[in-house]
Image (cartoon, rainbow, N blue to C red):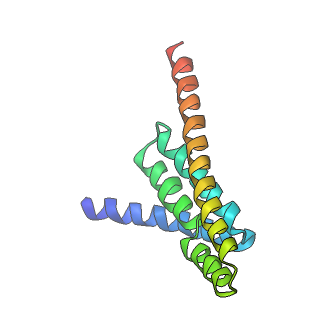
Amino acid sequence: MIKKFIVSQFFLISVAAIISSLISFIINEILFLNILGCFILGFINKLFLSRRVKLFFGFGISSSLTSYSKWIMNIFITFDKKSYLHSCLIVSYHLMLGIVFLFIGYLLAEKLNKIIYKIKRY
């Protein structure tokens, strides 16, 4: 029973990771993908959803969509070109925008939860 549960979760996360990896490959814009991933993570984690849905979107889609290694490589390339200010700006706006969009996703999900709760009450 436990083994089947773990295998099904692994499969669910793997499918989501494949989908978001393909999206990431097609779009190939690091800042946009990181912001989108943060937004999805904030939105999904605040919604009242099943663990499986949260695993699919929050862990599978969001974590594979965002790219820490691409981001770090981008910083390294600009740093290697002696563009130190640009490297610092990349770090700053990725972090700030990531936090802002995670918070926006969280707030939107919170409002959606309230709307759904009101609809269910009636």
- Is 103 positioned to the left or the right of 36 in the image? left
Q: x and y percent of residue 24 in the render?
A: 66, 69
Taking the spot 58% from the left edge, 65% from the top edge, the residue there is: 66
Q: How many marks?
A: 0
Taking the spot 49% from the left edge, 68% from the top edge, the residue there is: 14
57 vs 3, nearest the viewer: 57
Q: x and y percent of residue 41 in the render?
A: 53, 51
Taking the spot 64% from the left edge, 87% from the top edge, the residue there is: 80
121 vs 94, nearest the viewer: 94
Quadrant that contains the C terminus: top right
76 vs 34, nearest the viewer: 76
83 vs 99, nearest the viewer: 83
Q: Residue furthest left?
A: 1
- Is 4 positioned to the left or the right of 17 in the image? left
Q: Residue furthest top?
A: 122
Taking the spot 61% from the left edge, 82% from the top edge, the residue there is: 76
Residue 2 in the image: above or below residue 14 = above
Q: x and y percent of residue 3 in the render?
A: 27, 65
Q: Residue furthest bottom?
A: 80
Q: x and y percent of residue 72 in the render?
A: 57, 76
Quadrant that contains the N terminus: bottom left
